[in-house]
Amino acid sequence: ALLLLIAFLASADAAVVVERHVGISSAFSRPPAHPALDLTDPRLSRRGLSEDAAGDHSSQPEQVHLLPAGPGAMHVVWATRSALDDGAVVKYHKHVDGEDETAVKWAEATFTSTAYTAQICLAEGQSVSPTMGPRTPVRVEDLVALANTSTWAEPDAANYRVIKDADDVIPSGWFGNPPWAKAICLAYNNPDAQYQSPIINVAHLTGLEGDAHYHYAIPGDTKTHRHFNAPPDSLKAGKEARASTVFAVVGDTGQTEVTAAVFEHIAGMDDADVLLHTGDLSYADGFPPRWDTFGRLAEVVMDRLPSLFVAGNHDVTTNGLESQAYHTRYPSPHRSSGSASPEWWSFDVGLAHVIGFSSYAPSKGPGAFDGADAPLTRWLEKDLKKVNRAITPWIIVVFHVPWYNSNHGHFKEAERARIALEKLLYDAGVDVVLNGHVHSYERSRAVYDYQPNECGVSHLVVGDGGNYEGPYGGSWTEPQPAWSAFREGSFGAGRLELHNATHAMWEWRRTTCVEATETTEFGGDWFAPTGDRGVNCKSSNDISAQAMEAVDRAVFVRDPIACPNRGVGSGPGPESSGSAPASSDAGEPDGDARAGETAASVFLGIAWAVTLVALAYVYAQLRKERSEKRFVIMNDDIEL
């Protein structure tokens, strides 16, 4: 831990030869904006699957993505135009550098296939006049053509309808006036108003070794194989601990040029083990084909980096329009974690026990029309009791709507859930909470009940993935709360590295600033990305004190001596972890385990004391160096 901290604080990236910008100063020349992502861009269009393409491409896979399915298991999900032949399988094998690929024995995994139909709708005005991204994500003239059944239906038919212009499809003022959350659909009895999904295929790979490199081959693929690294196993008795565990973090992605830049940044995280998505994936918002275009755009990352998702409002709650698509295309590992619902799940990755749940599942009940009494809360209590800190020292919780957010956008929207669940997470010693929803980035200090608390949870809002609703940078509350350590209204992604059982490093890096260049049909600003890739810029509407900062970093420290809740967790851990089963007398650890924990606590106390002394020395040296060379540390906090 000491060496890691010294290396971090002394690194070239941590000490940068630039002055800290204060307030919202804009001491730079703003680069010109560049065009938004066109929906005809090859990253979004169907690759090689057009009707006039030579050959039969109906079985060619696209929208390929990987999702952990349980210990040693992985879902491979992909789409095809047609159902695959009986007997087709996904082949995979553990790859070893230098081996003869033609001589290896490939394992085989069968798969299930499904498809669905969905009514074509629009659920919000951003679909026709967004704040950012393509100016017309959905072309109204296309909807007019589909709705005009008079071109083919008999005049006496029940579904005969003459459509003259856009107002016959979307009444004037429909999206320009409250209530804002309302959908409008093409007529259900119009066969052209139904979207047919591609065939969604899901293969279940099993027997994977943690941290091993695998090649896999999908039926009909033009690539000989694709590849991924299996997520690292949790700590096990008799096995040497892996050096670190790395998560990429993103949320509220959508599908704009900004999204593409964020995915490009994540694709460059070669050491990431798993991608954690904080919800709101495609922003289809009632227009089903946008699930396909999102899948194509995201494949550059998700066909090689296993990804875990939680549901956002744009995924499941918009009048129920998106729930089927989200759950069909992005299955969760809920069955392996004892959950009855795909809306809440847990999964062990290396040093971390990761919990994900939907912000829209009731945390307290029953409600007036509920059919169950808050099953999420009951499951969460049980899951936290199963955690064994000797196996997974870190606990990370992911849900969409933040509890700690100092932006007027979605301010205190999840207060009821916070009141119901915050103490449960605090008592269990949860280390980090990841959220999205607010289209900006914010990092809290360790906090509990709105007060900085060294034993509280660090909340990271990463809702800046690039969707078409644009930045929230102009909506920060003032003054900045004491619990808020950093906030910025631009776009980017995060990286969380768990170095060992006590120290972790978080980094958020900006990928894009945006500039208001035009207006929308509703009179608001339309933002375009600037051309500098997020290095020396600020988004034009960002009023945060950190608006010019391109990077935010923090070191998180787990100290069960100073914070006893960080030591809570002597449960059995995952069933397949290899740990001994819990005893019948309240699950107390055996004598060897208790002795190990005592020794670990003593060692941790000594290490922590040495670390404090070393930190004091390092900071003294850095202050001296800074005064001589005008070096600064960019946004580095140590959260205890």
Image (cartoon, rainbow, N blue to C red):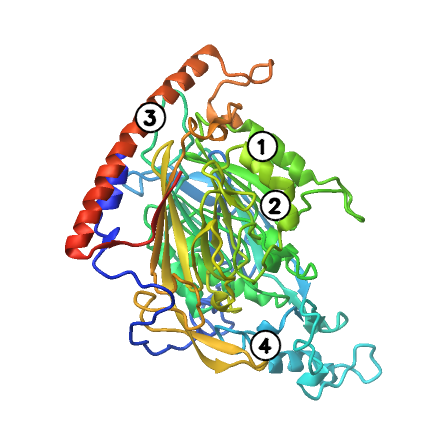
* Label placed on residue 594: none
Q: Secondary structure at mark 3?
A: loop
> Which is more foreground, mark 4 or mark 2?
2
Q: Which residue is mark 4?
A: 128
Which residue is at 65% across, 38% downward? 377
Instruction: Determine the CA span between mark 2 and mark 1.
Output: 18 Å
Mark-to-mark CA distance, 1 and 3: 26 Å
Which residue, given by chain and number where applicable, does mark 2 sit on? Answer: 418
> Which residue is located at x 15 percent, y 56 percent?
629
Q: Position of residue 457 (x, y in %)?
A: 49, 41
Of 41 and 410, nearer the camera is 410
Q: Separation of disc 3 and disc 4 at Cα?
A: 55 Å
The residue indicated by pointer 3 is 240
Q: Which mark is residue 383?
A: 1
Q: For the view shown, which residue lies furthest in the top direction? A: 591
In the picture shown, does residue 281 fall above or below 30? above
Residues at badges 3 and 4 in contact (C-beta under 8 Å)? no
Dot 2 amino acid type? Arg
